[in-house]
Structures are given as structure tokens and as C-alpha cells.
């Protein structure tokens, strides 16, 4: 996935860029609103991370211009402003999400992934991997035409793997996205869920779709 970070604080921008690149994102950087708008005119992005307090054209104006240009790329706005009226202004300018500074990269990553999933649901309600089909609108899973009953958490984990099909999903990413209090979740708990998923998804088939990547996490592909 391609991300544009528009942030004048180079330390924050480079820290975020390194984090996303470790997660296999392609990242462009702009340190002011004008350069950010120029990049948006010539490139397509899955998500834009936009600082509010930019020199020159600020983040609010950048966001307004994006929507005027009919660019509907999801936008996460970053700012040190914490009052509710500031959040309302940011969202009303066209932002899809809002994060206050300082922030943890893990939360930013989770919010980016959530936005990408939300857009994908609208454009493609079904995803198929070999003979496995996920219907995101109905939250149904089938393989070879047969419905598979999953618990809500099993479904959420499978959905996360499918949205990143072919890529390794780290255990910490699963925990960060699907559990509100990650202090209560160990890697052993994730392994138990994965064992149940494999039993339901793969046991009756020669083609195994869910793979363990040792010391890293899990991936699904055909």
C-alpha cells in the first residue's frame, strides 16, 4: 500500500516513514502543504497522514482542497490540538480520522489499516483466495461453496489475514487491531485462535491456506 505523510516535523515524519516501511508500505514524504498537494496530483495513495500545523497551507486547507478536487483518499489528521471543537473542525474539513500528538506508531498503524479495510469493503464486498470466499457485508466465510461457522474473534483474525493476503501479519499487529487492552493478550492466545482457524479452514483440504512464518506471524495465500 502507498502512504503519503505530510508533516513538517522531520523527526516525526521520518520515524513514521521507517515504521510503515517495516510493515511493507511504500511511503512518500512532504514537509509542507504545497509539496503534499503536488504529490497528490501525480500519485495515487491508499491513505494520507496529514499534520494540521503546516507552514504555508495548513492541514485543514489541504484537506478541503483534496475534497474539492474530488480526491477521496482516506485522511488521518495529526495535531497537538486536543479540544473537541478542533477535532470537529478537522473532521468537518474532510478528514476521516483524527489523532492527537504525541502518539504511538502502533496506534497509527492500526488506524491506517482500519481505514484501508473500510474503503476495501465498499469497493469489493467479497474477497476470494483459492476456493475460500469472505463476504464482508454479511461477515460470512465459505470454502468450496460450504459455509464455515466462525466465532466473531476468529472471523476478525481471518479478515485481517485476508486483507493482507500474501503478506506476513505480525502477532503484535493482530493484538493491536483486535484487542482494546493488549496487556491481557499473549502470543499463546493468538496461537490458540490460529489453531482453531486452521482446523475450520484447512483441515478438510489438501491445499492449506494459512501459514505460520516462524518468529514473525502468519499469512494467508494460495
Image (cartoon, rainbow, N blue to C red):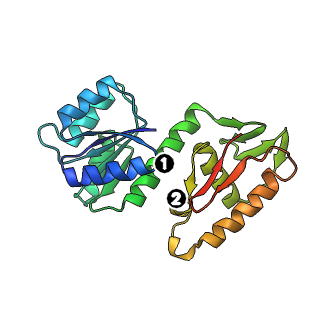
**Residue sitting nearer the eye, 76 or 165:** 165
Query: Residue at image x 51%, y 38%?
Result: 119
Residue 173's disc number: 2
**Can you say whether 179 is above or below 50 in the image?**
below
Left or right of residue 129, residue 100 in this image: left
- The percent position of residue 1, horizontal first and vertical second, equals 46, 38
Earlier residue among tags 2 and 1:
1
Q: CA distance from mark 2 to mark 1?
A: 10 Å
Decide: marks 2, 1 in contact (CB < 8 A)? yes
For this orientation, the residue located farthest to the front is 214
Please, what secondary structure does the residue beneath circle 1 have?
Answer: helix
**Label 1 CA crowd tier, 10 Å (few <14, some 14–19, many 20+):** some
| Image label count | 2
Foreground mark, 2 or 1, reads 2
- The percent position of residue 24, horizontal first and vertical second, equals 46, 45
Query: Residue at image x 39%, y 55%?
Result: 108
- The percent position of residue 206, horizontal first and vertical second, equals 85, 45
What residue did someone put label 1 on?
A: 113
Query: Residue at image x 43%, y 36%?
Result: 46
**Label 2 CA crowd tier, 10 Å (few <14, some 14–19, many 20+):** some
Query: Image quarter for residue 145?
Result: top right
**Can you say whether 177 is above or below 184 in the image?**
above
**Residue sitting nearer the eye, 214 or 2:** 214
Left or right of residue 100, residue 151 in this image: right
Query: Residue at image x 69%, y 47%?
Result: 139
For this orientation, the residue located farthest to the left is 56
Query: Image quarter for residue 4?
Result: top left
**Residue sitting nearer the eye, 157 or 165:** 165
Whether residue 215 is visible, yes or no, is: yes
Amino acid at each position: 500500500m502507498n502512504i503519503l505523510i505530510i508533516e513538517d516535523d522531520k523527526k516525526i515524519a521520518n520515524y513514521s516513514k521507517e515504521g510503515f516501511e517495516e510493515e511493507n508500505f511504500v511511503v512518500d514524504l512532504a514537509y509542507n502543504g504545497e509539496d503534499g498537494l503536488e504529490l497528490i496530483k501525480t500519485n495515487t495513495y491508499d491513505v494520507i497522514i496529514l499534520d494540521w500545523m503546516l507552514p504555508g497551507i495548513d492541514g485543514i486547507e489541504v484537506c478541503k482542497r483534496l475534497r474539492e478536487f474530488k480526491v477521496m483518499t482516506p485522511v488521518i489528521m495529526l495535531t497537538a490540538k486536543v479540544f473537541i471543537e478542533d477535532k470537529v473542525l478537522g473532521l468537518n474539513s474532510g478528514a476521516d480520522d483524527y489523532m492527537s500528538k504525541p502518539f504511538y506508531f502502533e496506534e497509527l498503524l492500526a488506524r491506517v489499516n482500519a481505514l484501508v479495510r473500510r474503503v476495501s469493503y465498499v469497493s469489493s464486498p467479497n474477497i476470494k483466495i483459492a476456493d475460500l470466499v469472505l463476504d464482508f457485508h454479511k461477515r460470512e466465510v465459505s470454502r468450496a461453496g460450504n459455509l464455515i461457522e466462525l466465532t466473531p474473534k476468529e472471523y476478525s483474525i481471518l479478515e485481517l489475514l485476508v486483507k493482507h493476503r500474501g503478506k506476513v501479519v505480525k502477532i503484535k499487529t493482530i493484538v493491536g487491531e483486535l484487542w482494546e487492552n493488549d496487556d491481557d493478550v499473549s502470543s499463546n492466545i493468538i496461537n490458540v485462535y490460529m489453531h482453531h482457524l486452521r482446523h475450520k479452514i484447512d483441515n478438510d483440504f489438501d491445499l492449506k491456506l494459512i501459514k505460520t512464518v516462524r518468529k514473525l506471524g502468519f499469512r494467508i495465500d494460495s
